[in-house]
Image (tube, rainbow, N blue to C red):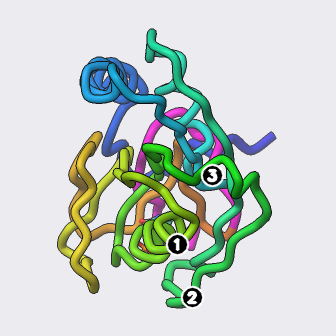
Amino acid sequence: MKFIEQDVKEVLVSSEQIEERSMELAAVLEKDYADKDPIFLCLLNGALPFMATLVKKIRTHIEFQCVKVSSYSGTESTGSVSFGSFDVNKIKNRDVVIVEDIVDTGLTIKKVTEYLYSLGAKSVEVVTLLDKPSRREVEVKPKYVGFVVPNLFVIGFGLDYNEKYRNLPYVGVLKEEAI
Ligand code: IMP
């Protein structure tokens, strides 16, 4: 039996750090959306583990939905974003919080934000587990950030390399021989 951990060169963000930071982010989101009726939108597949961790720590009423968004193949951005189906009628006049795994070039978040406003969202903010600002190609600034990471290709806690390693319980860097 081969464990996926064997392909990991280095742990960048541990599961304990993710737990702790998610607790802090949940507390801030509770406050910021206390008088609103927010809808959290999880961008599948990458944000699924973070979404599950985060929403269970929020003690106020929220709604959530998931939408499949594809923007990557291998380690390079394809530059185009495609959306799967979700209940678009839920977005009109709502305060939307996009839940993302990582903001890299910023293209995905930009496209998703524009799309949500075109559906009539009242406000759109982003909570992301990771931010890689050094790679930005468009001007976007996620309001709620778990951890800023350096310009490295990372995997785990939802993040994949060709659909693998999403189930690692932490964020890490792959060994060269695994790529
Ligand atoms: P962006 O559109 O370039 O900001 O990229 C957003 C998407 O690219 C994320 O939701 C990830 O799915 C993927 N991505 C960006 N950087 C990484 C990485 O280091 N590892 C794995 N996936 C990444």
In the image, the segment drawn in magenta is 163-179
Closer to us: mark 3 or mark 2? Answer: 2
Q: Is mark 1 on a helix, strand or loop?
A: helix
What is the quadrant of the C terminus in the image?
A: bottom right
Residue 6 appears in the picture as rendered: no
Q: How far apart are marks 3 and 1 (CA)?
A: 34 Å
Q: Distance between the residues labelled 1 and 2?
A: 18 Å
Which residue was labeled with disc 2?
80
The one nearer the camera, 103 or 38, is 38
| Badge 3 amino acid | Tyr
Q: How far apart are marks 3 and 2 (CA)?
A: 23 Å
Point out the tag, 3 or 2, that comes first from the N-terminus.
Answer: 2
Which residue was labeled with disc 1?
118
Q: What element carries label 3?
A: loop
Residue 43 appears in the picture as rendered: yes
Q: Does the residue labelled 2 lie within 8 Å of ligand 1?
A: no
The one nearer the camera, 30 or 69, is 30
Is 153 situated left or right of 132 in this image?
right
Magenta region includes residue 77? no
The one nearer the camera, 147 or 9, is 147
Look at 31% across and 45% down and name the residue there. 12
Closer to us: mark 3 or mark 1? Answer: 1
Bin the neighbour count of mark 2 within 10 Å (Cα to Cα): few under 14, some 14-19, many 20 and up: few
Q: Is mark 3 within 8 Å of ligand 1?
A: no
Q: In which quarter of the image is residue 102?
A: bottom left
Q: Is mark 2 on a helix, strand or loop?
A: strand
Q: Is mark 1 within 8 Å of ligand 1?
A: no
Is 28 situated left or right of 95 in this image?
left
Which residue was labeled with disc 3?
165
Q: Where does the image place residue 166, in percent across and percent down from the top left?
A: 63, 49
Bin the neighbour count of mark 1 within 10 Å (Cα to Cα): few under 14, some 14-19, many 20 and up: few
Residue 163 in the image: above or below residue 51: below
